[in-house]
Amino acid sequence: MPTQPYSARNAFALTRRSFLGAAIGSSIIGKVQAKPHRRIAVVDWAMFETLLALDVEPVAATELVQFRKIAVEPHVPAQVADLGLRGSPNFEMLRLSNPDLIISSRWFTWAQDNLEQIAPVVSYSVYEPGRPPYASAAQITLALGERLGRKQRAQAYVDISFLELAQARLRVADRTARPVFLINLGDARHFRVFGTDSMFGDVLQRLGFTNAWPKATSYAAAAPIPLEALAEVPKASIVIISPVPPDARSTLANSPLWNAFPAVREGRVATLPPVNPFGALPAARRFARVLTEALFALGEPNG
């Protein structure tokens, strides 16, 4: 739906008010005293990218090869040890990294006992069902900054993130008339969709767009959705977040179904580079930037 233009300063003030009224959505696991921590391990990607944004270099983190491919940024220093898969971190490697603090999230409650045997654990939750995550990510950034002696850096990062999104909103103000599907392709016949409680969906709305997917999601649709569902909102643009399976890319090019969608026929499909789908403020900023660039690459404003 169209939005009224307003100054970046006003956008910043409005977003700050909504942020300050949001719930922190974080919880502490274990008894962690407020003291400087020199050796920090992290098992959650949202927390990992937040630490890197605060110039805190963890001694160890999970799935670094995949993080560099999917999250892309922030840069991961070479000396960070790889703890293996997020779903099954290498506890022996974690122990050998000798952390004095482990930063986790609600996704790792199953591993709480194992983690606490190695070091004190602090856990924060960016994502909760039905709740847009941006405000939580901002407050968690501040909480981590306070805990780790990076308070000023954390406040500056939160402020510049708000301002960056406000400026992006101004830039795309004449392109928000069409709703947008945010999808990731599983194959040539199915996709998962990012709703309002995903970081992508939250940022999309903050930029002034309407999410074309009206149904409830849980961060992103868990079950594969048939491609035909994209026909339910024919006026919508389609934004595909990479990676795209090679077989899906080649098959879609010759698919009568895909080529019959109005968005495809009219050139209203954009493919974004990879962005961490379960990230925090760094992912939000990257998504806003690459989305804005992709929409301008499509050509004239839609209406």
Image (spheres, rainbow, N blue to C red):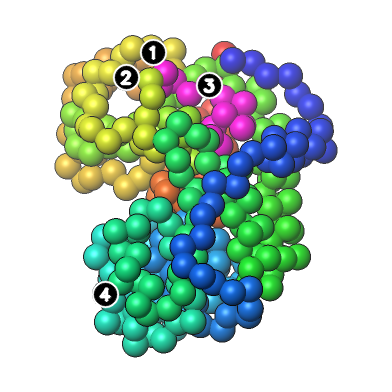
Task: Determine which residue is flagged by label 2.
Answer: 230
**x and y percentages locating residue 62 in the rendered image:** 35, 68
User: In terms of sequence position, does the residue under pointer 3 or pointer 4 come before the other?
Assistant: 4
Vertical side of 66 occupied by 33: above or below: below
Q: Nearer the viewer, mark 2 or mark 3?
A: 3
Residue 281 in view here:
no
The image shows residue 220 at horizontal and vertical percentages of 36, 36
- Residue visible at 38% across and 12% down in the picture: 234
- Residue found at x 53% / y 21%: 210
Q: Decide if residue 132 is in sight here.
A: yes
**Residue denoted by label 1:** 233
Amino acid bearing label 1: Val
User: Which comes sooner in the sequence, label 1 or label 3?
Assistant: 3
Most foreground residue, 7 or 235: 7
Q: Please state which of the two labelled residues, at mark 4 or mark 2, is closer to the viewer.
A: 4
Q: How crowded is mark 1: few (under 14 residues within 10 Å), some or many (20 or more)?
A: some
Q: In this view, does 188 lie to the left or right of 181?
A: left
Question: For the stretch drawn in magenta, what is the main secondary structure?
Answer: loop
Percent across and percent down for residue 195 are 42, 30
User: Which residue lies under the disc numbered 3?
Assistant: 210
User: At label 3, which amino acid type do we have?
Assistant: Thr
Residue under pointer 4 = 90
